[in-house]
Amino acid sequence: MVIILQVGDASDGTNATPAVPAIVRNDAYFLNALGDRWAKDQGIFQPGQTYRLDRLPAGYGGFEKNRENSKHVDRYLYGHPNGVMRSLNEAFPHFKYLQENGGAIGCDCKLCSGKKPVKTRVSSGSPAVRTQAPVKQKRKSILTHGGYLSDSSEPGRSRQVDEEGMVDVYRLLLDKVKEAGTEGSVLEMFADQVSPDWRAGHELVEELLSKKDPMYSPRYGELVLFTRSGPENIHPRWEAGVVTQLPVEPISDEDLLGVPPTKTHNVSYSGFRVEPMPEPNSNQKQYSSQHKYVPLHCIRPLSLWRDCLKGDAGSQTHPTLRHALTVASSFCTVGPIKFQGTWPSASLYMRGCFIGPELVVLGDTVRLLPRLSDDQDSVTDIMIISSIRLRFVNMDEANDDDYDGEIPYNTCLHVLGKAYTLNPAKGYRGEDTKPTLPRPDLAIFGTWYPMVDPDETKAKLEIPFARILGKCFEESAMKAWLSPPATTPASSFQAVNARPMTPYKPDLSRGLEAVREARQYSADNDVRIDRESEKSWFWAETRIEQLDLHEVNGRFVGVKDQTRDKIQMRAWRQALKVLDGKKGSSEAYAAAIREREVIQQSQSQQVEEAFGMMGGAAQQADSGTEGEASGRAGGEVGIVEIEDDDVAETEPQGDTMDVDDLPPSQATPKNGMLTSIPKPIDLSDDEEDQDELMTGWGIRGT
C-alpha cells in the first residue's frame, strides 16, 4: 500500500536544470526516498507500507545519469540556490527544514551552511567510524533557469582533503585506476610526498617493521602485561601497558628467565619502557605518566592474561587490564609499500597491522582461529605471513566523491601467506598431503601438513584479518612463561601466575579463550564500535587513535597535540615544497611562517597584558596607605583568571601481485617483483569468517 504525504508550499527552489543532455529528469527516486525518510522521522512509518511525497518542493527537480559500462546510476537534486544535492543525505535535512519552518532561513544543511558531510569508513568486521570534516564555505554556483553559467557541464566533486587540509592520496591513486580503465593497470611504489608525517617517518617505520627480533620480544606500540615488582616477588600485580621504548641491547632466550649478567646497561637502556594503558573513550589519562622500565622476564603477552590472573579476586585486577581489553576489537594498518589496481578493484600492500594488542608484520608466524565448519574448537592452523593487503573493491558501484555522503568505495583487509595444519584432512591434497615442518620448534605440537602447494612459490592462502588469533610465539618463550622454574620457590612462582603451577604442556590453543573473551568484551564496551550497524570492530587511522592515547613518552599526541593545527600543517607542506624545489613555494612558506608568528605573538601579547593587569593591581595594593587598604578590604576586588587557549566477505580479486613480485624490467633498486600469482585460496567459507566490507576512504599511514 502506498501512502501519499502532502508537501507544504514553502520552498526556495530556483528551477535550475543541468545543461548536460546525459542527465535526465526523473523525480521518482527522491519522491520515494524522501517520503520514506520523512515518515520515519515523523514516527509514522509502518513496516510493509510505502511512503511517497505528492510532489517535490516548488523549483526542485530530480535528475539521474547512468554510468558507462556500469549498472550504477548517479542521482542529483537540482533547485537549491547554492548548488546541487548529490545524495539523499544532503537533500533530506534541507527538505525537513523547509517543511518544519516554512522557509530556508537558518537552515544548517550542507549547502546552506557550507559544512562538509561526515565522512564514514567501515572496517572489515568493524563499525562505521565517523569523523567530522572541516567546515569550509563552498563556492556558490551561479544558476539560471536554463542551467549552469560556468565552464563546468556537470556537478563537480569537492576537493578531496581531510580535516588537516591533507590531500587524500588514496583517492588520487583510485582516480588513476579509474582513468586506466578495465584494460589498463596501475602499479606504483607508495609515496605520500605532500604528507609531513610520511616524509618524516616512513624510513623509521620501515626500519622498525623490518627488525628480526624474536617474536616473543615486545614491539613498539604493542599492549602487554607487566609487573613492577618482578617475578621474584611473592605478590606481584600484573598491569597492562603500551610499549613505548625498546632496549638498546639485543634480546635473547636468556632474557626470558632473568637479567643476563652480560648486560652492560641498566634497565633504562636494556629494558622496555611500558606506559600503563589509560582508559579509552575518556579524558582521564593519568596512567600514561606512571611509566616503568622493566626487563623482558617481567613482561607477558596480553593473550595470556587469563593464565597470569586466574585465581585473582576481581578487586585485585588492575584497572589497566580492563582498559586494554576494551580495545581488543580494533585494528589499524602501518607501513604502506605499494599500490596496484585494475578497474574496478585495487590493493594497497602494507608492512604490518595492529590487531588488538599485537603488531603482526611480514614474515610472522600467526595462529588462526578455528572456523565454525571445523569439527574441533581448538587451534590447528598457522600461517607464515607474506602479504598484508588493503583491498579496494566494487569501485564501479561507488561514487568518486568520498565527502558527499553518497555511496563510497568499499575496502577489506586481507592477510596472505603459506598455511600449515595439524589436521591432515585440511592439507592441500587431503589425506595424501606430505608432511612439512614450517618451523623447527613447532615439531613439538605434532605433524604439520601444508594447506597450499609448497612447491608453488606463488600459491598462498588468503583470509580476513579477523581470522588471526595472534602471534605463534617461540616454544622457548611459552615454556619460560608457563613453567615453574626449578630454582624458584613454589610459593613465589605461584604468586606471579596467580594459580598453582603444573608442569608445562605444549598447547597451540593457549590463550584462545582469553582472546575470544577480550574481543567480545571490546565489542560490548568500546563506544567507538557501531553496534547499531551490527559491527564488531573499530578501524583506526593510527595506533594513537586505536588506543585513544593523549601522551606518549611525555609528549602530547593525537587530539592533544597542539602543534598540529591547520596553519602549522600548511607551513610544513610549504616547507616540503621548498625542499623539493617547487616554484613559488619559498614565498608561500615564508607567508605561512609569518601568519603563524602573528598568531603566536597575538596570543603572547594577550597573556602578557593579563599578567600586567594583575601585577599592576598588586603593586597598587602594596603602595596604598593603611586606610586605603582597610577601605578596599570591604569592597569588591576584580580577579583576572588566565586560562589556556582552546587550542564483504569478498572473493579474492583475481591475480594479484605480491610485495616482492615485479618483473626485472620494472624492478626498482629496493624491490624485485613478479607480474602475477595464482588466485589465492580463501579459508573464510562460513558465517564466522564473513569479511564485512569497509566503506570509505583509506587509512593515512607512515
Image (cartoon, helix red, strand yellow):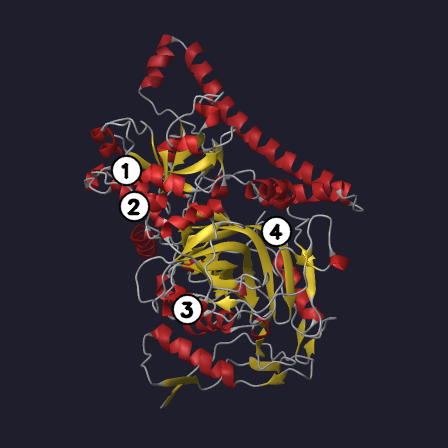
Q: Which residue is mark 4?
A: 165
Query: Relative to the observer, which residue lies in front, 118 or 303?
Result: 303
Q: Residue visible at 28% across and 38% down?
A: 318
Q: Residue furthest right?
A: 583
The numbered mark, 2 or 3, whose residue comes first in the sequence reads 3
Q: Which residue is mark 3?
A: 431
Amino acid carrying mark 2 in the image:
Lys
Assess whether mark 3 and mark 1 are in contact (beta carbons under 8 angstroms): no
Q: Residue visible at 47% across and 53% down?
A: 437
Amino acid carrying mark 1 in the image:
His
Query: Relative to the observer, which residue lies in front, 521 or 456?
Result: 456
Q: Which residue is mark 2?
A: 505
Residue 490, compared with residue 321, is above or below; it is above
Q: x and y percent of residue 168 in the render?
A: 62, 56
Tell me the CA gap for discs 1 and 3: 48 Å
The numbered mark, 4 or 3, whose residue comes first in the sequence reads 4
Inspect this view and state whether residue 158 appears: yes
Q: Residues within 10 Å of mark 1 (few under 14, many from 20)?
A: few
Mark 1 or 3: in front is: 3
Q: Residue furthest bottom?
A: 1
Query: Relative to the observer, which residue lies in front, 135 or 492?
Result: 492
Identify the image quadrant of residue 536: bottom left
Q: x and y percent of residue 575 in the render?
A: 71, 40
